[in-house]
Image: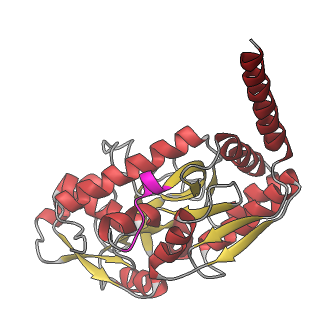
């Protein structure tokens, strides 16, 4: 009897110790690792959100930029970090794309990380040169199919959400458009506006000045809702393409095995941070929609992205490194 009482007491003590640890968390600064250089979009988002989260957690989230290998260096660092609740990865779709395209150099997202929160999204817009005689996607399809070999589209990154969205559009509609790869997003916009290329799918921020100047015509946007800056432009869902996704998303991931109570705490603080008006206003200047999901919702986002990229590999739009 005494031995069973001793075991029960020990279990009770362990449980109370775990609860106390969870209540005390965090007791030291937390690393917020970013896979891109200072000044980029995910870096800016991380710093905006981390400042508010630091207030709520009463511990500093220290932003640590580890650029290189399309963010795979940072991903690998976090995947191998102790799963103790003091290292988190602030990342983009790149975490999924990199693994599919560069499996030898990038950690497997589903096995290597515990999703925490999808903190924000930025949808893409499909644009045509203003002189192109098309006002919508239906007219674009009809126009393009009579001009095989004459239609090109601009992109600045193979594997980016906008590139993936454009390739999916080609797959769904059989638009015969060839990719023109640009190093500079501004030059891509200039060449589309001048008619050197006919199509461009991109985030709203770099294209909005050209839209407002009447040089580019938006004909569809990704995502579940129309964009506030161009409310007349329908979504792909509205016009019959519900599976076409082209959002850049920004998420928080933890090393796999991070205690659930720590993941939940960080997720709750991220959701809370996204509700501040000044956070919403800062993100709005970048045409970014605030999120703040549960870990389960973030996991679904990640799984859906992996499946979408695998489909694009299957249809030949992407070619993994062997």
Report x, y in % for residue 174.
15, 58
Q: Is residue 302 left or right of residue 39?
A: left
Residue 220 pos. (x, y %): 40, 55
Quarter of the image that includes the N terminus:
top right
In the picture as drawn, the residue positioned furthest to the top comes out as 1
Quadrant that contains the C terminus: bottom left
**Residue found at x 51% / y 68%:** 75
In the image, taking residue 66 as reference, residue 108 lies left or right, namely left
Percent position of residue 234, x then y: 43, 49
Report the residue at 64% width, 67% height from top.
286
In magenta stretch: residue 110: yes
Residue lying farthest to the front in this orientation = 2
Q: What span is colored magenta in the figure?
A: 105-112
Q: How many marks are shown on the rendered structure? A: 0
Quadrant of the rendered image containing residue 252: bottom right
Among the 4 quarters of the image, the one containing residue 202: bottom left
Q: Quadrant of residue 278?
A: bottom right
The front one of 301 and 203 is: 301
**Image spot of residue 213 (x, y percent):** 53, 76
Q: Is residue 169 magenta?
A: no
Residue 267 as seen in the image, left or right of residue 191 = right
Viewer-nearest residue: 133 or 89: 89
Query: Is residue 214 something that shows in the picture?
Result: no
Foreground residue among 254 and 187 = 254
* Picture layout, residue 24 above or below residue 197: above
Q: Is residue 295 visible?
A: yes
Q: Is residue 227 left or right of residue 142?
A: right
Q: Which residue does the image show at 16% across and 78% down from the upper left?
A: 150
Residue visible at 73% across and 27% down?
Answer: 11
Closer-to-camera residue (239/76) = 76
């Amino acid at each position: 009897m005494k031995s069973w009482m001793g075991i029960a007491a020990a279990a009770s003590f362990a449980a109370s110790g775990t609860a106390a640890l969870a209540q005390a968390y965090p007791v030291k600064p937390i690393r917020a690792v970013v896979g891109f250089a200072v000044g980029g979009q995910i870096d800016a988002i991380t710093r905006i959100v981390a400042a508010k989260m630091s207030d709520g957690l009463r511990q500093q989230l220290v932003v640590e930029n580890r650029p290189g290998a399309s963010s795979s260096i940072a991903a690998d660092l976090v995947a191998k970090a102790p799963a103790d609740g003091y290292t988190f990865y602030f990342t983009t779709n790149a975490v999924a794309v990199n693994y599919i395209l560069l499996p030898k150099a990038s950690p497997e997202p589903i096995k290597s990380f515990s999703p925490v929160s999808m903190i924000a999204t930025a949808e893409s817009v499909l644009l045509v040169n203003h002189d192109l005689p098309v006002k919508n996607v239906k007219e674009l399809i009809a126009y393009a199919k009579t001009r095989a070999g004459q239609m090109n589209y601009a992109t600045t990154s193979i594997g980016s959400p906008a590139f993936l969205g454009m390739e999916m559009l080609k797959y769904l509609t059989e638009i015969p458009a060839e990719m023109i790869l640009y190093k500079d997003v501004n030059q891509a916009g200039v060449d589309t506006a001048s008619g050197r290329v006919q199509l461009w799918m991109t985030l709203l921020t770099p294209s909005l000045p050209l839209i407002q100047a009447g040089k580019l015509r938006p004909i569809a946007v990704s995502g579940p809702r129309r964009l506030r800056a161009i409310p007349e432009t329908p979504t792909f869902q509205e016009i019959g393409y519900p599976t076409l996704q082209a959002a850049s998303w920004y998420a928080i991931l933890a090393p796999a095995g991070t205690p659930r109570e720590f993941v939940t705490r960080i997720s709750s603080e991220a959701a809370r941070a996204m509700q501040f008006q000044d956070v919403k206003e800062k993100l709005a200047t970048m045409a970014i929609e605030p999120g703040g999901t549960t870990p389960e919702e973030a996991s679904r986002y990640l799984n859906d992205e992996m499946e979408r990229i695998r489909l694009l590999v299957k249809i030949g739009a992407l070619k993994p490194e062997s």
